[in-house]
C-alpha cells in the first residue's frame, strides 16, 4: 500500500518587517497579514555576510491566542505554521503565485 501523506510545518524566528493590517473577509474569519524577515549570518575567513528572507505571514486571530496589539514593526516573534500557495491570473493574463505562512501558533519573544 502506498502512503501519500506528508508534513507541512514551518518554524520561523524573525522580526516583523511591515505594519500588520487586518483583512476583512465576507464568509471567512478576519486575518492579520504582515511581512516577517529572517536573517542568516555567514562567516568566511575574516568576512561576515548576511542573507535575509522575507515571508508573508497570515494570522487568523480566531484560531490563535494572538492579540493585534502584540504585533508591531520590529517585534521579534516565533511562528509555527504551514505553507499555503495561492495562484491567480493578473491583469496581463499572467499566472502569478504567492506562498504564505498560515500561522498555527505565534509567540512574541521581545
Image (cartoon, helix red, strand yellow):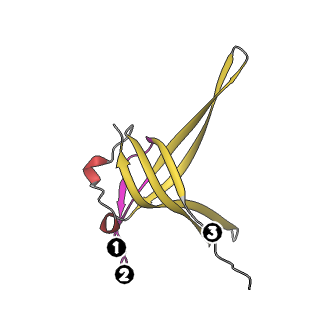
Which class describes the residues within 10 Å of circle 3: few (<14), some (14-19), or many (20+)? few
Q: Nearer the viewer, mark 1 or mark 3?
A: 1
Residue 56 placement (x, y as % from top left): 51, 54
Disc 2: which residue: 27
Q: Secondary structure at mark 2?
A: loop
> Decide: marks 2, 1 in contact (CB < 8 A)?
no
As for residue 101 lying within the magenta part, the answer is: no
Write down the region rendered in magenta. 15-34
Residue 57 placement (x, y as % from top left): 47, 55
Most distant residue in the top direction: 46
Quadrant for residue 53, please give it. top right
Sequence-first tag of 3 and 2: 2
Residue 108 placement (x, y as % from top left): 34, 45
Between 14 and 19, the one nearer to me in the picture? 14
Sequence-first tag of 1 and 3: 1
Q: CA distance from mark 1 to mark 3?
A: 27 Å
Disc 3: which residue: 91
Give the answer, above or below, for where 23 lies relative to 10. below
Residue depicted at 35% across the width and 78% down the height: 26
Which quadrant of the figure contains the C terminus? top left
Q: Taking 33 as reference, is 47 left or right?
A: right
Residue depicted at 33% across the width and 48% down the height: 71
Instruction: Say the numbered circle drawn on residue 29.
Output: 1
Between 84 and 11, the one nearer to me in the picture? 11
As for residue 32 lying within the magenta part, the answer is: yes
Quadrant for residue 8, please give it. bottom right
Amino acid at each position: 500500500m502506498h502512503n501519500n501523506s506528508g508534513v507541512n510545518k514551518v518554524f520561523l524566528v524573525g522580526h516583523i518587517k511591515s505594519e500588520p493590517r487586518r483583512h476583512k473577509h465576507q464568509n471567512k474569519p478576519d486575518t492579520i497579514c504582515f511581512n516577517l524577515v529572517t536573517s542568516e549570518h555567514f562567516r568566511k575567513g575574516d568576512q561576515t555576510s548576511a542573507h535575509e528572507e522575507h515571508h508573508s505571514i497570515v494570522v487568523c486571530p480566531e484560531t490563535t491566542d494572538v492579540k493585534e496589539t502584540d504585533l508591531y514593526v520590529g517585534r521579534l516573534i516565533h511562528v509555527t505554521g504551514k505553507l499555503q500557495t495561492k495562484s491567480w491570473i493578473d491583469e496581463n493574463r499572467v499566472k502569478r503565485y504567492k506562498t504564505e505562512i498560515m500561522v498555527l501558533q505565534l509567540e512574541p519573544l521581545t
